[in-house]
Every structure is written in C-alpha cells, then in structure tokens.
Amino acid sequence: MSDKDSIDLIQKENKMRVKPIKGLVLGMSFPPMISMLVGALYNIVESVFVARVSEDALTAVTLFFPAQMMLISVGVGTGVGLNSLIARRLGARKQDEANSAASHGFLCALINWIIFAVFGLFFVDDFLRLFTDDPFIFSSALIFGRIVTIGSLFVFISVTIERILQSTGNVLFPMIFNIVGAVLNMILAPTLILGLFGLPGYGVQGAGMAVVITQFMVMLIAIIMLFGFKHHVKVQLRGFRPRLRTLKDIYAVGVPSIVMMSVGSFMMAGLNAILLTFSPTKDLGETAVAILGIYYRINSFVFMPVFGLNQGAMPVIAFNFGAKQKSRLMEAYKFSLSIAVGIMLVGMAILLICAPQILHLFSATPDMYALGVPALRIFSLSFITAGFAVVTVSLFQALAHGFFSMFVSLLRQIILVLPLTYVLIVNFGVTSAWASFPIAEVLSSVLTVFLLRYVYKKEIKNL
C-alpha cells in the first residue's frame, strides 16, 4: 500500500472514530436512504402500470414476488455479511483481510446467480403451480419469473459492489448508481409494459424486461465506480484464490441475514396460499392476493428508508465495536432508532389517512376498495413497533450475532404471522386476517428487548 493510500486510510479511520456520531450516521445513511426510497418508488410505479394491464396481471406478478424477494434477499444478505466483515477488519486495522473479503464478494455473486438461473430454467413453473391453475396468471408469472432469474447476475454484482463501497464509508457512489437505475426503470417500465414511443406493449413480460435492462445498466456504472476510482479496500480478481475461512466469515453473518430477509419471501408465499385456499370464493382470494401485493409495494416505500438508515449505521456500529468505542457505538444505535421510529410513524399515518387514494393508484376495482381500505389501515398498525425491531436486528448483525437477527425475523414473519393469519381467516374472515401483522410485531418486539439486554451485557457493557 502506498504512502498516499496509508494517509487516506488514516483519515478515513479518524472520521469513523472521532467525527460526531449524529453527523456521521446521517452522512452515511442519507445517500442509501434516498437510493432505496427511489428504488421502492420505481417498484410501485412498475406495479401501477402492471395493474393497468389487468387485476390478473398484478396477481401474476404478486404470485412470483416471493421468489423475487428470495433472490434479492440472497444478494443483499450476502452483502450484509460482506459489509460487516470488511468494516470490522478495517476497524481492527487488518487491511489485507478487508481486501480479501471484498474480492470474495464477487465469487459469492457468481454462485448466487448460478443457483437462481437454474431455478428459473427448470423449477419456476413447479413453484407457480403451487398457487394457480389460471392459464393467463400462470403464463404471465412464468415469463416474468424466467426473465428476472436468468438475468439476475447483474443485480448480484451491483449489490456486491454497493456493499463493498458502503463498508468503507462511501455511500455517495451507491446512491448515484441506484438513482440512475430507478430513473431508467421508471422510463422503461411504462414503455415496455404499455407500449410508448412507437414500441409495442409487452404487458407483464415488459415488466421483466425493464427490470433486467435496468439492472444491467446499474451494474456497468457500479463496475466503473469501483475500479475507476481509489477506495479504502482493493478488489483483486487477477490471481484470486478463494479462502474457505473468508467465505465462512462472510456467511457467518450473511446466512442469518439471508434467512432473516428471505422469511418475507416464505411469509408471502404462505400468505398467498392461505388467502387462495381459505377465502370463501376463488375471486375473493385472488383479489386478496392482489391487495397483499399492493401492500408490499407500499410497505417497501416505508421500510426501505429504514433499511437505508441501517446500511449507513451498521458500518459505524461495526467499526466502533471493532475499535472498542462503546459510547460511540451506543450513540449510533440510539440515534438510528429514533429516526427509524419517526419514519414508521409517518408511514402509519399515511396508510391510515390515504388508503383509498393509494388503491386508486393501482386501478382498484370496487371489490379491491371494499377489501383493501380496511386491510391497509390494519397493516399500518404493525409499523408502531417495527422500527425498533428492524434497527435492533441491524445492531445484532453489526456485532456478528446473526442468529439473533435471524430468529427475530423468523418470529415476526413466519412463526407468528402465518398461524395467526390461518386462525383469523378461518374463524373471522379475510378482513380480520390482516390483524396478524400488528399482533406478530408486538409479540416479537417483546422478545427483541430481552435479546438486546443479553447482547449489551455480553458484548457491549465491558468494551
């Protein structure tokens, strides 16, 4: 490493060690918050145009959505493990190990793509047959699913680069290429779905095409930003030799993070099955699935800024944990928590007040209004405690307590939600089933408090 690189690294470490925490967390969190908020917005925009094709088209995309969530969960969860490892190694002044971890991220991206490409080619049709026998819904979801999975290499690489840069405190570049991608998708989605500028409309297939083209462009920009500029870690692909120990270190946090994020995928698949099986009529079940899809798009618009906040705060927490700076670690956690709770309360207010207007954006039918307005309002109550759980899970990840983060997420989204939804829909009808979300959030938050006390006493108190 050159003298200039050494000076740059020292300046970076001084920033992480001594810069006021509130300014540091905000400075590192604001770009990913903006980029993820814009990303959530283009998901909503895409769904709005799919809904204009038909309610069945929106149902088709929603049925594949659990698999798409799983794909993103694997990529981002691996990135969380990579981010945490690089930040901890930099905090402990182990530069070579940080460089090695960054290089291993690309191997992980390639492996993840192979897995999902195989799924898209050979197994996605079997997955979709679990939920529908409607010819239009099935064929539309199948085409969309194959396009997204086979083209997923681009998103895996771009997410890897994003997390490498964020782990060093560079949050500006990820914000830039994510915003560029979001803007591009908001142009491509209506163009390819409905047909604009003289091009034919491809419907649901066009939605998949817009996703993959956008991800390809984002990947190209990310590669230029990673290899075209100097950073505090160096990716070395020439002569690269994988090390099992480094992969284990990445996935010690990465696997629980993947499980934690992918439980949403399993939850949505389970909810789709419950709604389609136990609703009084087939049409009501399909309408309920479409409403669930709308909620998840709106949910992401509220949660993504909090996840962006975590992306900025987690390297700060991990770095100061490695540097044994207790007061700075706790200040970063508490400040992040206060912001997250505020965001969630604003989101709750929007859903409570604007539920009819939100459904109007998705070309809601009268049946969707009747079922969807109370659904969105009930869903919003889960936001009250969700901010605490999400930020605390990020603290567990930063301190390499991946199992705790995984367990809390399983409790919130699988262990409690699915049984509660089944009991409520069977005994009280579809509308009451949505109450499973706020009930699960409250119960899981109680457990999270006990886990937080344990981690504090074991890992933080005596730093």
Image (tube, helix red, strand yellow):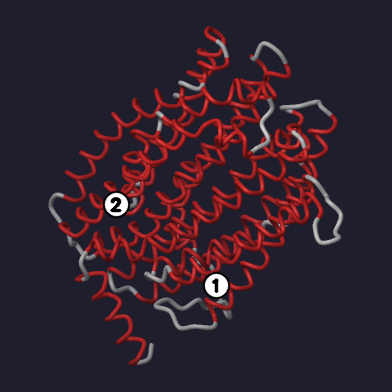
Q: Which of these two is toward me, 15 or 7?
A: 15
Residue 260 placement (x, y as % from top left): 46, 41
Circle 2: element type:
helix
Query: Residue 429's quadrant in the figure?
Result: top right
Q: Is residue 23 visible?
A: yes
Left or right of 393 on screen, residue 82: right
Q: Which of these two is toward me, 156 or 462?
A: 156
Q: Which residue is most to the left?
A: 462
Residue 385 placement (x, y as % from top left): 33, 34
Residue at x-position 68% and y-position 18%: 284
Residue at x-position 67% and y-position 51%: 115
Identity, as a three-letter code, of the amino acid under mark 1: Arg
Identity, as a three-letter code, of the amino acid under mark 2: Ser
Q: Quadrant of the N terminus?
A: bottom left
Task: Identify the residue position indicated by label 2 in the image.
Answer: 336
Task: Identify the residue position indicated by label 1 in the image.
Answer: 241
Left or right of 116 on screen, residue 54: right
Q: Within 10 angstroms of label 2, few (less than 14), some, or many (20 or more) residues?
A: many
Circle 1: element type:
loop
Left or right of 248 on screen, residue 146: right
Residue 225 placement (x, y as % from top left): 53, 77
Q: Which of these two is toward me, 436 or 66?
A: 436
Q: CA distance from mark 2 to mark 1?
A: 38 Å
Left or right of 456 on screen, residue 140: right
Q: Which residue is most to the top?
A: 427
Q: Within 10 angstroms of label 1, few (less than 14), some, or many (20 or more) residues?
A: few
Residue 320 placement (x, y as % from top left): 24, 62
Residue at x-position 49% and y-position 58%: 79
Q: Nearer the viewer, mark 2 or mark 1?
A: 2
Tell me which label, 2 or 1, sits earlier in the chain.
1
